[in-house]
Amino acid sequence: MKNFTAPSWAPLLQRHHINTFDALWNLDLEPVDVPNLERGGHSEVSLLTLEDQRFFVKRQTNHLGRSLQRPFGEPTFAREFRNIQRFEALNIPALEAAWFGERRSQGTWRSILVTPALEGYSDLIAWHARWNQLSEHEQVSVIEASARLLATLHDTGWMHGSLYAKHVFLKSQPGHWEARLIDLEKSRPLLRRTAERLRDLDVFTRRLTAWQPEDWTTFFTAYAGTVESGRFWQEKLNKRLKRKGKS
C-alpha cells in the first residue's frame, strides 16, 4: 500500500526528517503501555513530541485481522486507518491520521499509524472520575455531547464495536462541547441496526456508575432526539441488561 501523509502534517514531519516508513520505524520511543502480543504478533503505541504537537506512533509486526476488504488478513492498524478516513468522509467526529504505511516482505508484515494527540480533550472516564466536582451545567453538557456523538455514529449507519467510555473524548469550548471517538479498529457498518446499537450502548454504560437515573434520561433524550424516543432506547437497553443479568 502506498504511504499516506495528511497534507496538514506533512511539513512538520518533513522538517524533522521522519516522513518515511523507515524513519518512523527506527525511532527510539518508549511504549506508553504494555505491548499487545495477541494475534501472534507485536503491536505497541509510543508518544512523540514534535515542536508543540504530540503524536501517537503506533507500530506493529504481524498483528493481523481479517476484514471484508482483505479477507485473508491485514494489519489491524490498516483497518483503523481506513475507518478514520471513512469517519472523516461521513462527518463522524473522531481522531485524525497524520501518516500511515505498511511493508510486507519475507513473511513479515509491518505497519505504522501516526495520529495527532487530541490536545485539550479528556476521555469520558477522566471526566467521570471528578464528576462531583463538575457543575450541574458541566455534567449535562458532558452527557449531551456524548449522546450526540453516539447518535451521529449510529444514525450514519455505523457501530464502534468497542465503545467503552474511555474511547469517547470531550473538550469544553466557548458555548459548546466537542466530542470525538478513538480506537476505530473494530468499527463497521451496522448490520442489525437495533441489536448492534444496543451492543454499543451496553458497552458504553459500563463503569459510568456516578451517573444517576436522571442523567441517563438526559443521555437517552439527547441520543434519540425526544423524550419518548429516548425512553424507547432506554427500555430496550434495560431489557438487554436484564437478560444478561446486569441489572
Image (tube, grey):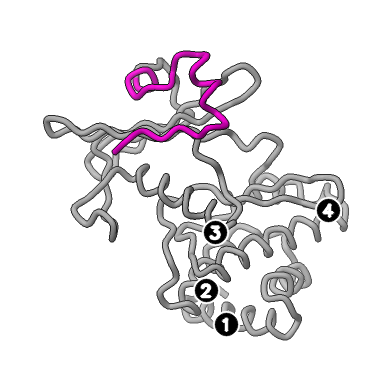
Please say if the residues under marks 2 and 3 sit with CB atoms less than 8 Å apart.
Answer: no
Q: Which residue is mark 4?
A: 138
Asked if residue 208 is positioned above or below residue 94 in the image, the reply reads below
Q: Which mark is residue 236?
A: 1
Image: magenta residue range: 1-25
Mark nearest the camera among 1 and 3 is 3
Q: Nearer the viewer, residue 230 or 94?
A: 94
Does the image show residue 34? no
Q: What's the CA distance linking mark 1 and mark 4?
A: 27 Å
Q: Nearer the viewer, residue 91 or 93?
A: 91
| Residue 54 at x, y percent in the picture | 59, 26
Q: Which residue is mark 3?
A: 90
Tell me what residue is drawn at x 49 percent, y 60 percent.
Answer: 160
Between discs 4 and 2, the one toward the N terminus:
4
Amino acid identity at mark 2: Leu
Q: Which residue is mark 2?
A: 198
Between discs 1 and 4, the one toward the N terminus:
4
Local crowd at mark 1 within 10 Å, few (<14), some, or many (≥20)? some
Please say if the residues under marks 2 and 1 sit with CB atoms less than 8 Å apart.
Answer: yes
Between discs 4 and 3, the one toward the N terminus:
3
Amino acid identity at mark 3: Leu
